Image (cartoon, rainbow, N blue to C red):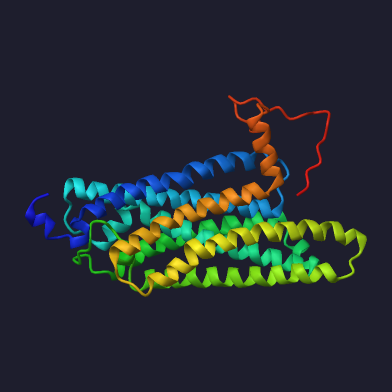
Amino acid sequence: MNEEVQQNYTAYERSESFTKTAWSMVAVGFVPLVTGCIILLLVSSIKHKRKELIFFTALCVSTLILGGGYTAAGYRRLYVLSYAEYFISPFDCLVKAVHNIMFEIGETTSALVMLLLTGDQLASMISFKWYLKFTSRKAELLLVLIYTLSCVVYAILMLVSLLITDQNTRISPFCYQDEAMPGNFYKVHCDFLLVAYYISFVVCLIALLCRKFMKKKNTAAGRLGQMIKQKKVVHRVSVIIFFRSIFQMIPMTLLSFTENEGLIDNMWLAHPLGLTLELILYSAFDQEIRHCVKRLCTGQACIDLPFVPCCRSTTNTETIDK
């Protein structure tokens, strides 16, 4: 890289640690990509999906998108360092940098899905009538709407950037989100994520308190079985919330108090790993997914793929505690 181009980059961007971080982003992005694909294949083999499992599938999809964003962001950094690109316009960043749209959609949908999931579990603990009114079909339609709106919002962002942003302005070719997004959108986006995480955390705590309180209530026999199942669901959701608070909520809160670029990069590297850990732990607690893994490991594949024969029994029906 010649001296003229080096002057366009900060001291941190010229350092060796920045290059190492770029390679780390590529590697870290592959972790949720591979894990999410495996879990989605396992979940897809379950014919009758519970509402909770529909939300979990959406979380897997959001994690896949976010993992792809990290890989794309790392590749973008390596590309710029290799070809020594000069500053570019904000609109060019929104168009050329694939990782921006992946970050936007992955982070937003993941936060919204967690809000819906925790709210749904709280409803099941407070009023079972509310829980039953929000059917699996309605959940699927709402999730489709969320992903569609996320794509529409990004398209609007590109249009706004084209109309109101001075295209003579030049920003870093690494296309950081806070520089590429028009106006204060990035700050609003981060604030929204933090608020969504904190609300999900509080709602989950309330659901856990209701879960504990319901142990002491006299419940009709017909309601008791369903209540026990929902308590197990709340327990699984609380695991996701706990690790989300460690790997996302707390780091994002701390990031607002520091401007150290190296520290910020390293803290963000833990983000996709935390999401992956959430998916793995949830899958470990879900008996249906464990059942699929067990059949797969014993040679009785439960994934309907052309090259993997399905070995479900057609004579014996196994009862799975959900």
What residue is drawn where x is 68% and y is 28%?
300
- Residue 19 on image: x %, y %: 25, 50
* Left or right: residue 226 compared with residue 237: right
**257, 102: nearer the viewer:** 257
Query: Is residue 151 visible to the viewer in this orientation of the structure?
Result: no
* Left or right: residue 247 compared with residue 221: left
Residue 215: quarter of image: bottom right
- Residue 253 on image: x %, y %: 44, 72
- Residue 223 on image: x %, y %: 87, 61
Count of picture labels: 0
Residue 112: quarter of image: bottom right
* Left or right: residue 163 compared with residue 298: left
Residue at the far right: name it.
221
Query: Is residue 318 visible to the viewer in this orientation of the structure?
Result: yes
Residue 226: quarter of image: bottom right
**1, 108: nearer the viewer:** 1
- Residue 269 on image: x %, y %: 39, 55
* Left or right: residue 172 compared with residue 234: left
**Image height of 23 relative to 263, above or below:** above
**Image height of 305 relative to 266, above or below:** above
What residue is drawn where x is 48% and y is 47%?
32
What residue is drawn where x is 53% and y is 65%?
245
